[in-house]
Image: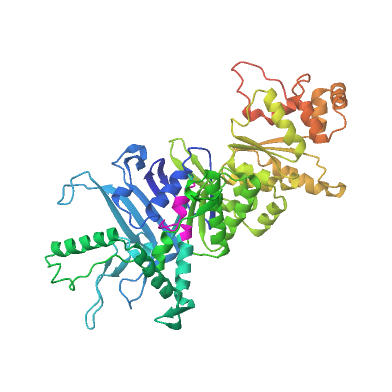
Amino acid sequence: MIENYRSIERCEFRPTKLTALVGENNAGKSNILRALATVLGRDWVTVNSFQDNDFRDHDRSRDIVIELEFSPPLTHQAYQGTDAVHVPVIRYKVTHYKVNTKRAKKGERRLETGCFDGAGKPVMALLEAPRTGKQRKYGPLVNIPADVREQVPLIFVGSDRALEDQLPSGRYSMLRRLFEDVHDQLRATRVPAEVEGKSLEVSAQELFARRLRAALDVLRIPAFNRLEELLRTRSLENLGYDPVKDADKLRFHFELFDAMEFFKSIRLAFNEGGATIDATCMGTGVQNALVVAIFQAYEQLRKRGAIFLIEEPEMYLHPHRQRFFYRTLSRLAEGNQLIYSTHSPNFVTIPEFENVRVVYRDANDTTKVRASSLLADNQLREKLRKEFDPERNELFFARHVILVEGDTEKLAIPEYATRLTIDLNRQGCSVVEVGGKKSMKAFVEIVRSFGIPATVIFDSDSSQYGKNEKDKEAQCNEQLRSLQGEAVAVVENNPDYETVLRHDLGEDDYIALCQKYPGVSKAVQARLIAADDASPVPELARRMLRRFLPLPKAGTVQPRPQGP
């Protein structure tokens, strides 16, 4: 739950393991991701982690609240050897002091953090280490302990695709987490080494430490030694010691620590034309390719338990690579949680519609999130998977969807819209063919469950049904007619599109147009007829696009709909 953060007044939603945030530009998708990154993507959150422009309408009197619920719950162990307590909910609240205090003045910002149970009550934990014969004292967790925060490793990939953020030096980078595993394996790996003239087997970490010290010796030029000596003597003097007499009381020297510190300094580099180039100095396309490669390595090594926040994963990727990368993210979601914003149909699929969250601005210009209200049962999922087509995924991004049976209407409708001066793209309308009338109802249920208005166009006599299936077709027709409502307009072609078009244009004109465009498929011929400015726009087109036509002026007489 997020309150009063940028464009968000109050937004509450439950993400799945793989959640796609879709919506128009400026709907607030990035604000959702950045709210989560602000509280999860740093070692320690302070009141200075929030800026003035983070407050809704820049109103600092409003409290920013970011509350996260985890399943299974996080845990907290106050003292070693004691039982851990469950922490289902953590909350960050940016508020202000109500009165003057010794620490701050009235009105100054302050950050309140806490751990809560599912009922919103503070989690109770031990207040002091248990002692034999003394009753244990419990109290509410008034902050979020380090051991709780560490259970939520976060990896954030912003739209700038900064490779720098994913290098091992980044606290929440993918490479850092991969190198942490390498570092763990370093301790367990045994390697041969020469120690004081003897051949021994030591841990790889110990051998690395020996060679680090040897490398440090190379750095000990006079300027290095002089700097070390000055720091040694001045620090002893500042502590009240004699640098000569008390030299053994507090020793100071430069040192190289363990291998993980070395891993943190690793950079990625390219060799080009004999020159070594830092990868962070390469173009955005190269940097993005490396970021994607790190994702793929992370997935292949089966890292688990992280939360990924990704802005527009499709950036800089060819459509085929987008689909490939989406499969990588889907596999990553098996052991991690991914929440990403996208404008690409390649990063959503209709069979997994429960993973989509539509982000939009309501009448009060505040960001809202809408999930499907439809139950994702296996039967429905398999039916949709049978009709899977990446082009159909576009319906999640539409403000209005025109659902048609096949390519004939799909190709003709945009041409008629152009001739009626209707800009479907500007109005956010997508024409989606559903693979036949039998699949129409399932698609309607999906778009309706997301609150997306739709126009349903179908033939009462479809070639999908055989001669012995007329009863089934009649039942299907009745189901589709019953969908008519405020959010769904139903247009029925009786008996089919071609017959109604023939009637509207007139038999002779229709035959002449068909003869004008011979040797092409039925669907292409329908498009060419629709685009032909020499022919009239049929009433059929006006019925299909009625929702986009301007309202008639008061007092005008409208023509009666025609049909066979």
Residue visible at 23% across and 80% down in the picture: 131
Report the magenta stretch's main SS: loop
Numbered marks: total = 0
**Quarter the C terminus occupies:** top right
Given residues 192 and 552, the one toward you in this image is: 192
Res 448 → quadrant: top right
Res 379 → quadrant: bottom right
The spot of residue 431 in percent (x, y) is: 67, 37
Given residues 23 and 320, the one toward you in this image is: 320
The spot of residue 24 in percent (x, y) is: 53, 38
Residue visible at 48% across and 39% down in the picture: 27
Residue visible at 73% across and 43% down in the picture: 478
Given residues 281 and 4, the one toward you in this image is: 281
The spot of residue 213 in percent (x, y) is: 36, 69
Outermost residue, top side: 555
The reply to whether residue 349 is visible in this rendering is no
Instruction: Please say if 400 is above or below 471.
Output: above
Residue 391 horizontal side relative to residue 48, left or right:
right
The reply to whether residue 471 is visible in this rendering is yes
Outermost residue, front side: 222
Span of residues in magenta: 161-175
Instruction: Please say if 110 is above or below 298.
Output: above
Instruction: Please say if 2 is above or below 75.
Output: above
The spot of residue 18 in percent (x, y) is: 55, 55
Res 108 → quadrant: top left
Given residues 378 and 306, the one toward you in this image is: 306
Instruction: Say if the magenta span includes residue 373.
Output: no
